[in-house]
């Protein structure tokens, strides 16, 4: 609430000075730059108060923290930044007493050229507005966009920030995201997890036994895994080995838990391969 209060105080103070200069025309001419600057500041702070108050009410209704961000609050911030940028441009032009109507008419050809040159940025900004207020993706969602997979940590007018599984931050242009294929794992009630691996023939007694062994391995996480979702598939049969795919469904998106289950499964498979390899070597030496 203090954030709204100090913004409102600055807004009122600037407005009082502005109206004082308006009442005294001789001062308005003498302090033209101050007058125009106050005009700009009043607009910026007035707009800021409106957007801040709107975001504050929204957070209160959603029971969000004062600094917590989602699509709506991020979208409000983006719109505010866009409006202020336009206002600042108009303020700079007003310092040289440039008539906006004449300027934009005379620069129509130049503006068309600029629009062609910056069409990618413009399309990215438009896509950013659409994505911000859509229900397809939200900040905090775990998604796959093209070949990139991770958690959305930011939405701006031009880019989306993605925190990958390797803890890298990737910035993707909004137009590429908007026109690309998006898989949102957060929107589904459960997520299917797959672990692909290859085992030599001598290490596999039977598919059923291997499946039971893997289920026992991940049993410490069984309260996160749906009981009837376990499935061990034979993906490919080769001359000396078999490629498997072990699948199960988890009831919530938790990257750390998912990574821990995979780590435990892979390490168990490595130990199994080492044991089977050592046994096969001993048997081979015994035959010799």
Image: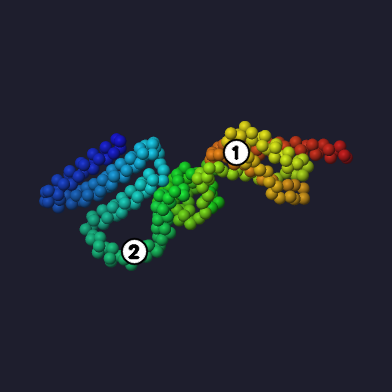
**Residue at the extreme right:** 288
Tag 2 residue: 111
> Element under label 2?
helix
First in residue order: circle 2 vs circle 1: 2
Above or below residue 217? Residue 201 is: below
> Element under label 1?
loop
**Residue 249 position in % (x across, y down):** 59, 41
Residue that appears at 51% across and 51% down:
182
Residue that appears at 77% across and 44% down:
201
Check disc 1: other Cα within 10 Å, few if <14, some if 14-19, many if 20+: few
Q: Quadrant of residue 287?
A: top right
Q: Quadrant of residue 97?
A: bottom left
Q: Is residue 12 left or right of residue 247?
A: left
Q: Is residue 166 left or right of residue 5?
A: right
Residue that appears at 20% across and 48% down:
34
Q: Which residue is nearer to you in this view: 273 or 180?
A: 180
Residue 226's disc number = 1
Q: Which quarter of the rendered picture does the N terminus lie within?
A: top left
Residue 110's disc number = none
């Amino acid at each position: 609430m203090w954030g709204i209060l100090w913004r409102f105080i600055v807004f009122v103070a600037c407005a009082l000075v502005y109206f004082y200069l308006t009442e005294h025309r001789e001062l308005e001419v003498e302090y033209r730059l101050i007058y125009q600057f106050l005009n700009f500041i009043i607009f910026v702070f007035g707009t800021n108060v409106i957007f801040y108050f709107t975001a504050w009410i929204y957070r209160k209704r959603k029971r969000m923290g004062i600094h917590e961000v989602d699509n709506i609050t991020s979208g409000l911030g983006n719109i505010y930044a866009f409006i202020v940028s336009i206002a600042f441009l108009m303020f700079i032009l007003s310092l040289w007493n440039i008539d906006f109507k004449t300027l934009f008419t005379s620069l129509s050809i130049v503006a068309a050229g600029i629009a062609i040159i910056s069409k990618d940025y413009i399309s990215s900004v438009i896509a950013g507005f659409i994505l911000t207020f859509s229900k397809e993706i939200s900040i905090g969602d775990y998604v796959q966009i093209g070949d990139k997979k991770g958690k959305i940590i930011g939405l701006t007018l031009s880019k989306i920030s993605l925190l990958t599984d390797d803890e890298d931050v990737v910035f993707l242009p909004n137009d590429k995201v908007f026109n690309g294929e998006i898989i949102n794992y957060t929107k589904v009630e459960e997520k299917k997890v797959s672990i692909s691996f290859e085992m030599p023939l001598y290490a596999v007694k039977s598919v059923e036994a291997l499946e039971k062994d893997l289920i026992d391995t991940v049993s410490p996480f069984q309260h996160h895994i749906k009981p009837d979702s376990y499935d061990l598939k034979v993906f490919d049969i080769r001359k000396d080995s078999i490629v498997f795919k072990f699948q199960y469904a988890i009831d919530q998106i938790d990257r750390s838990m998912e990574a821990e289950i995979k780590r435990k499964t892979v390490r168990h498979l490595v130990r199994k391969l080492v044991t089977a390899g050592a046994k096969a070597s001993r048997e081979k030496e015994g035959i010799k």
